[in-house]
Image (cartoon, rainbow, N blue to C red):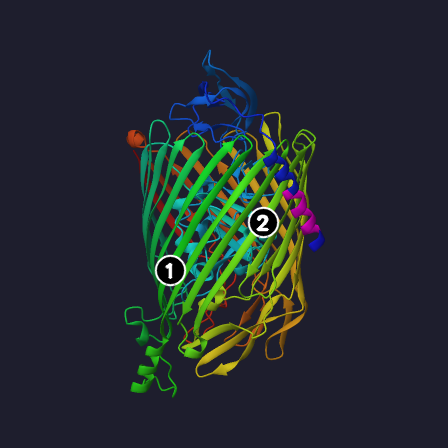
Amino acid sequence: MKNFSVILTILFLSLNINLISSEYKGEKSIAQLGHLKGFITDSNGENLIGANVFLQNTSIGAATDETGFYEIKNIPIGQYKLIVSMVGFESLKQNIDINTDKILELDFRLRPSFYETSTIVVTGTASQYLYEESPVKTEVVPRKLIEQTNSSNLAEALGLQTGVRVENNCQNCNFTQVRVLGFDGKYSQILIDSDPVVSSLAGVYALEQFPQEMISQLEIVKGGGSALYGGGAIAGTINIISQRPQLNRTKVSYNGRSLEGKLENKIGIMSELITDDGRTGAFLFGSARNRNPYDRNGDGFTELGKLNDETIGFNWFYKPDLNSQLNVTLHRIHEDRRGGNKLNLPQHEADIAEWVEHLRWGGKVKWTHTLNDAADYSLFYSFSKIDRDSYYGGLIDNNGDGIFSENERIAALDFYGNTRNNTHIIGGRTNLLIGTQKFTAGAEYSSDRLEDKSVKDVRYHINSKYENFGLYIQDDISLLENHFNLIAGVRFDKHSELNDPVISPRLNLKYEIAGGLDFRASFTTGFKAPVTFDEDLHIESLGGEQRVVRNAENLKEESSKSFTAGFEYQQFIGDVAVLFGITGFYTSLKDAFTTELSGVENGLILWERINAESAAVKGIEFDLGIKPIQEIEIRAGFTLKSNKYDRKQEIFDSQFTDNFLRTPDDFGFLRISYDPADRLSLFSSLKYTGKMTVPNEAEEIIVETDDIFFDAHFGMSYKVPAFDYFGGKVSFGIQNIFDSYQKDIGVGVDRDPAYLYGPQLPRRIYFGFETEF
């Protein structure tokens, strides 16, 4: 493995020296400039707004306006490949000549395809590819699907993708995590615009904190991603692509939900500003949300806690010239959530209280410069600053008489805590194009400072600083007239918690067998250093006692090797878009992390993270899709898998299992979109969740669940004629129509709040309104 990495390094360096020593001969003249314009419509002749028109391997491009018109001025003369794309439509490519003696006028008509089609993705390769052409299989959650599912945040936007599940892991504070191929949330790396700035602390509640207003699309790449993004990407990566301005407009929205009469309200605003020449623009967003607590079984303890949050942020860019761009983003998130009982009293007077108040600042400064058609580079700095105040605990009735002594009330004050986390990342990346080969190289340094005082016992406080320096190189080769793509890369990481550097190679290939039929295969690696993880910073309260997880003294890093191979057919049969995919996957874990109960001490339930010998995740995925007419799209996905340790793990005293916990061996989804009229849009979906293995700490038993779940959703939206000038729209729907939910949830103060499985939320009705001007 190390020899393979060294060979890649030598090859990359020798070819780049070759490039630097030779003069680039394909550069276009900058003394003379040309002009390109035209209209883009759909197959019915309707104008397409926001379609992208750009020149391949340049930063030159434009988007269509409200009339479907695009215009690109000041283009250096020469020959280019023009690419026309619009999310949800087929992409078109055409060779063009730009000269100064005439304005080139080109009109295009695009056929409708699947929502993901023609989406530009970057996560799998660190460079731009159209979704259907990417050598690395990428799942995409487009903006339209986020709106159709009535998603308020990142957590709700996920789940209708093959191999991906979101679950609620705590009845008190509703700590959520996303599972990719059955792995715990800590095995997936969450990125914001391709930067790993979501730290362990942020990961505890981050899925609900990032509002849908800031999300343009989500990109999901399954399998080890450490060759590009460093430690943490064993199961995969989830990349939040933030919204950018395209038009001058503002949207204001309201969304209300009712869960058995318990209301949740949210208002949001999005505003886009862009100059006529497209050289500068800003996207501003804000949201405010409040959720009332919900007690499903009437025991006085919440299943969904009380929540209030507010978010504000912006994404601004400036292009000093055609080849350069400065991008600045900033967001502020404030959240207050509490679960347990007696929510009208201070936290320390409740039997159980889990309360956290977050204040998060995050942002990025990025400079991108295209040197010529063959070379570009970018430099960036990203940061995240989180302050969290918390209470995990409650009054403990030591005598069992229901009367609390003064000492017991004073002891309850010990559960207040606070956590501070500052994350900084600085780095750079360069791309060099030589013929049909694209070389990518980059370096980044990250610093993650964590001070945690959530646990009442000072011996378990955390004061750590994790540092990592990474260097990566990658060769992306296109052969056989772009019918064959091969990506070979390697990353070197030196983590402060590891004595030796980690080498993470990767190999991906894509071969177009015939029109629309592709074969993809990959070998990727990942690793996780023994740091503090998200579940370590979520302190569950069991009967007023704190459940604490800490790393064993000699915990080693965990490493993975992932293999995938699959076929995908995506093509038009006549005017009908069809899709079928089948993918097999296998991931082996060396020194796999697991936890075991180590005892009870001073009111703390202590768990220790240790290394198991090894584990394996293997299975098969199926993807289906058909778009029989422009108005209807049907998509489905199903996953069959096995997640097992090589030997059984002792979870409780004499309670063993070799299964990964809280993950079913089979799950899937079906979604249907139907637009019967210009103003009316209908959406329905069904999520299936199979049986799983779940620990119940209150009873110290391992439960093999018997129930399967079907979470159905129906929604509709209608553009109100009276508000056409303002772009008004109303929406209505029911989520989890059959109220498919866990039947044996815990009861009372002694329940295990983590004994949860199945759908994340019970049945709820929603209503929304949006106006655009």
User: In the rendered view, does 482 fall on the left or right side of 530?
Assistant: right
Could you say which is closer to the camera, residue 704 or residue 147?
147
Q: Examine the rendered structure and indicate whether residue 61 appears above or below residue 231.
A: above
Residue at 54%, 19% in the rendered image: 96
Residue 49, quarter of picture: top left
Mark 2 element type = strand
Are the residues tagged 1 and 2 within 8 Å (C-beta)? no
Residue 647 appears at what percent x and percent y?
Answer: 69, 70
10 in magenta = yes
Residue 252, quarter of picture: top left
Q: Considering only order in the chain, which callout, 2 or 1, is on the residue closer to the N terminus?
A: 1
Q: Amino acid at mark 1?
A: Ile
Residue marked by disc 2: 472
Residue at 63%, 61% in the rendered image: 559
Please report the bounds of the magenta region as a residue range.
4-13
Labelled disc at residue 386: 1
Residue 430 visible at all: yes
Residue 423, quarter of picture: bottom left
Residue 667 appears at what percent x and percent y?
Answer: 59, 53
154 in magenta = no
Magenta span: predominant SS is: helix
Residue 262 visible at all: no
Mark 1 element type = strand
Q: Examine the rendered structure and indicate whether residue 727 appears above or below residue 639.
A: above
Could you say which is closer to the camera, residue 621 or residue 487?
487
Residue 396 appears at what percent x and percent y?
Answer: 38, 81
Quick one: which residue is furthest to the front in this view? 21
For the C terminus, the quadrant is top left
Q: Amino acid at mark 2?
A: Tyr
Q: From the image, state whether disc 1 or disc 2 is nearer to you.
A: 2
User: In the rendered view, does 462 fall on the left or right side of 771?
Assistant: right
For the N terminus, the quadrant is bottom right
